[in-house]
Image (cartoon, helix red, strand yellow):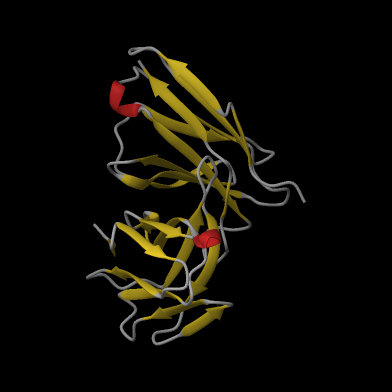
Amino acid sequence: TQLLEQSPQFLSIQEGENLTVYCNSSSVFSSLQWYRQEPGEGPVLLVTVVTGGEVKKLKRLTFQFGDARKDSSLHITAAQPGDTGLYLCAGEGGAQKLVFGQGTRLTINP
Amino acid sequence: KAGVTQTPRYLIKTRGQQVTLSCSPISGHRSVSWYQQTPGQGLQFLFEYFSETQRNKGNFPGRFSGRQFSNSRSEMNVSTLELGDSALYLCASSPALAGNTIYFGEGSWLTVV
């Protein structure tokens, strides 16, 4: 069974600080996706990384896929209160369609 | 383009009852997958349907079932409800089985009492 371990599970920081969320697995994934979920809504896709070592940037968010395609990270620069939410990583690579990490509940305090 | 629509949004059921949840995918999307989200277990894959056939299934008991219609709309059913079935049930659609972005609906909140 493929598993994704996401850390930290909870993170509360001040506006303007930087942060990194990690997503690790012992399994190889054909692609890895990052989602953000607001309360009462479904997850919304932020980015998909496919190639080992790939780095993608989305404004203040930087996503990296590990060389071995087993891990990924999400780095947010100068966090803002609007970044508050649940961040989920998900790997695609088997019969289970998407395997999700437990999520990181991020709170940015003004 | 309308998004993924799930109904009902909220429902309360009693232990032992059964429930049916509905999902209308984005127009043109033929793959529909279902996920269960709970605080303890996170998001877990239930099953996926494509062209009216179940293509993949997660590790859930047989009480959880689903189907897909010729218009790609899907339903999932949970029989003999247990308290632990209380969760947000999310439907997602994509154009094909693999290699495409999936789009989630807002979910159906099920509370079992």
Report the residue that reaches farthest toward the right. B1
* Quadrant in the picture for residue A95: bottom left
Towards the viewer: B22 or A44:
A44
Residue B2: image x %, image y %?
A: 74, 46
* Residue at horizontal 36 percent and vertical 56 percent from the top: A103
Q: Which residue is painted at 30% across and 21% down in the image?
A: B82
Residue with the most extreme front position: A110
A13 to the left or right of B91: left
User: Which quarter of the figure is the N terminus of chain A placed in?
Assistant: bottom left
Q: What residue is drawn where x is 53% and y is 25%?
A: B10
Q: Is residue A93 visible?
A: no
The answer to whether B12 is drawn above or below residue A78 in the figure is: above
Say if B83 sits above or below B68 in the image.
Answer: above
Counting the numbered discs, the total is 0
Q: Quadrant of residue A25?
A: bottom left
* Rendering coords of residue A21 (x, y %): 35, 69
Say if A61 sits above or below B76 in the image: below
Percent x, y of residue B88: 44, 36
Closer-to-camera residue (A44/A17) = A17
| Res. A16 in view | yes
| Residue A50: % across, % down | 46, 78
Q: Nearer the viewer, residue A13 or A64?
A: A13
